[in-house]
Amino acid sequence: EALDGSQLALDSLKGKVILFDFWTTWCRPCKAEMPFLERLYRELPKEHFALVAVSCDEKLETVQRFQKSRRLTYPLYHAKVKDLKGFEINGYPTKYLVGKDGRMEKLQFGKDYEEKIRRALLQ
């Protein structure tokens, strides 16, 4: 669910390169990556790239306050880990890259994944 109450329609993302970012407001590495994610969201073409940032915090209100305080412009979503089917989340941040062909790859924390995203956009 988006912070504004709307639902994410995954069908609307078909054919795009999608970066799923699972994070929490209390995770220091997650917060450190946010300026980078903001830059990616602003730079990459929305018709070919989607950033789906999912907070796994307990309370939606915590995430809403966090978004306002950080002035994040990319869309944030909120979900409980138990409700996230198809994703293995053992810690935060956890990222998955889905190519235009629908293939999903778990990205390793601390690795430079911007190059992988840009390469996937060219395919």
Image: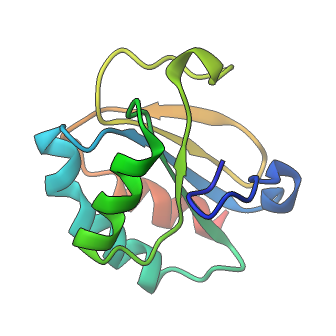
Q: Is residue 54 above or below residue 14?
A: above
**Which residue is more in the foreground, 118 or 21?**
21
- Residue 74 falls left or right of residue 47: left
Residue sticking out furthest to the front: 61
Q: Is residue 9 above or below residue 47?
A: above
* Position of residue 13 measured from the top left corner of the image (x, y, whole percent): 78, 59
Residue at position x 88%, y 53% from top? 11
* Position of residue 77 measured from the top left corner of the image (x, y, whole percent): 55, 51
- Residue 110 falls left or right of residue 63: left
* Position of residue 51 measured from the top left corner of the image (x, y, whole percent): 54, 61
* Position of residue 117 measured from the top left corner of the image (x, y, whole percent): 48, 59
Residue at position x 41%, y 50% from top? 61
Report the quarter where the C terminus lies. Answer: bottom right
Residue at position x 64%, y 59% from top? 17
- Residue 32 falls left or right of residue 40: left
- Residue 72 falls left or right of residue 74: left
**Which residue is more in the foreground, 15 or 85?**
85
**Which residue is more in the foreground, 55 or 98?**
55
